[in-house]
Amino acid sequence: MNDIVDGFNYLVTERTAIWQLLGQHVTISLLGLLIASLIALPLGLLVVRVRWLAGIVMALLSILYTVPSLAMLIMLIAVFGLSKTTVVVTLVIYAQVILVRNIVVGMQSIDRAVLEAARGLGMNAWQIWWRVELPLALPIMLAGLRIAAIMCIAISSIAAMIGVGGLGQLLFQGITFDRADMIWAGTISIAALALVCYGLLALLEQRLTPKI
Amino acid sequence: MSTIEFQHVRKIYPKATTAALADISLTINRGEFVILLGPSGCGKTTLMKMINRLIEPSSGTILLDGVDIQTVNATKLRQQIGYVIQQVGLFPHMTVAENIAVVPKLLGWPKAKIQSRIDELLSLIQLDPAQFRHRYPAQISGGQAQRVGLARALAADPGVMLMDEPFGAIDAITRTILQDEMLRIQQQLHKTIVFVTHDVEEALRLADKIAILHEGTIVQYDTPLNLLRNPANQYVAELLGADDLLRRLSLIQVRHVLQPLPKSYVASLTTIESSHNLRDGLNQLLASSNDQLLVVEHNQPIGMLSLAAIHAYLHPEVINERHR
């Protein structure tokens, strides 16, 4: 119990350093999530429209997803070195499965009659996407984003191991120097970040979900 | 109101061995309520969906008011054609009002005009605007949803309405009510309507003309009455149940078989409205102790109806022989 209190104490006394680590953590996670989303959206929409691609793409992404994140990081170090790029690419790969799958499920959840009506009434492809498909698929897509965001925060913690900073650094240094207060400070701050992020995205999801 | 003309239209789906539609030529006149009738797989829906280019013909031409629809941008074309489908397909994330406003919005109508049009249409389909405007599709019944679907299709006042088994998924009682509504609305608006169904009763009830399809061809295209009187072949006769004379009688109004009012008649005769059908007339004749009914219109006697007249109507050839 004392260790936890020590952990909070560490967070307060070292707040300047903590803010810096938090900034690094958020930056890497956000960057990974953003790039992942920018790739997932067109990829997901392509997969929805080109049926035969769906199986191939989902299988490939699922295989990548089964690779342990630590192993992925180490493999990617060989390509990108001990850099932020390595971490961001790892995040992009892992988030892909979740984001693409939810985009596909979201789009497929739309009643076909609704889409036929949209076409029959004279909406063009863009109008159907913007006014019908996007609002109806959005809740499921956002649920994917929420899970992917939590995953990015988690993987970013491990990434501290290769020296790119982030709150995970508290954990690794704590282990190295046998400092329970640092480990607790890292655990508490990462959990808090994940919870806040989850809450904010859940709120956004609620806001953007059609009333009925 | 618009004229639709099919000229030698064929449709062969890829990988199919036989044509879904084989050399269809058909003219649908302005303001006519035309029903495409046939069993599933006969090509009726394919034929209808070619009018708004949801399906493109393999060959042949379709003219809308004399203009080849291939020369018109498909979305522009669809915005000018009302479209109602069996599953309704209301947008679940939009209110009733927003659903109705879809096409006017696409056409860029001013807001005030759209709002007044929504109220006008809700009144037309007999849903109270104050009560229904802001409801979501999940908050209304199936019958109400299809009324809204109809209003949405009518929103921009299109000349042509395409209706794909619109009442097929609705319970029998509500269906009858909606069919009556449809007739009332058509009397008011005089749209050119192309309506697909496999329900013979519905077709006979609603149509000005019925095109009967069988395996990708139009077997016969005529008014319900003529189809029943002169079915082109056994298929048509069986499909329509043309042997059922009571069904034929139910399609003819009493006013068409009037006998002149005699100088004097029994005052206690049972009366019947001229707009009722002959089946009702026959029923009342059989129930009455007299062999004649007094036909009235706006409470004024205008003629007589007798068993002999109904019989003669069903057998015109007998009258002709006598006259000879």
Image (cartoon, coloured by chain):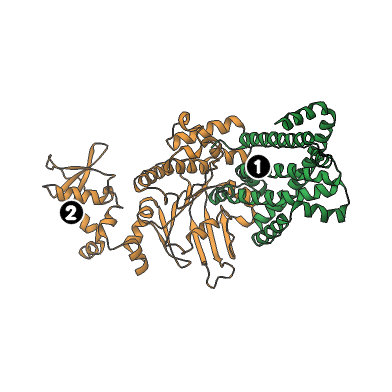
Chain colours: A green, B orange
Q: Amino acid at mark 2?
A: Leu
> Chain letter of disc 2?
B
Q: How many marks?
A: 2
Helix, strand or loop status at disc 1: helix
Q: Position of residue B140 (x, y in %)?
A: 45, 38
Q: Position of residue A168 (x, y in %)?
A: 79, 40
Q: Is residue A136 left or right of residue A193?
A: left
The quadrant in which residue B249 appears is bottom left
Question: Going 47% across and 31% down the picture, which residue do you hit?
Answer: B129
In the image, residue B319 above or below residue B31: below
Q: Position of residue A175 (x, y in %)?
A: 80, 41
- Nearest to the observer: residue B98 or residue B263: B98
Label placed on residue B307: 2
Q: Is residue B97 left or right of residue B278?
A: right
Q: Is residue B203 left or right of residue B137?
A: left
Helix, strand or loop status at disc 2: helix
- Which residue position is annotated with label 1? A142
**From this viewpoint, is residue B232 visible?**
no
Q: Residues within 10 Å of mark 2 (few under 14, many from 20)?
A: some
Question: Going 68% across and 35% down the picture, which residue do you hit?
Answer: A195
Q: Is residue B231 left or right of residue B194?
A: left
Q: Residues within 10 Å of mark 1 (few under 14, many from 20)?
A: many
Q: Amino acid at mark 1?
A: Leu
- Nearest to the observer: residue B18 or residue B229: B18
- Using the numbered discs, state the Cα–Cα distance from disc 1 to disc 2 in whole angstroms: 73 Å
Which image quarter is the C terminus of chain B in?
bottom left
The quadrant in which residue A179 appears is top right
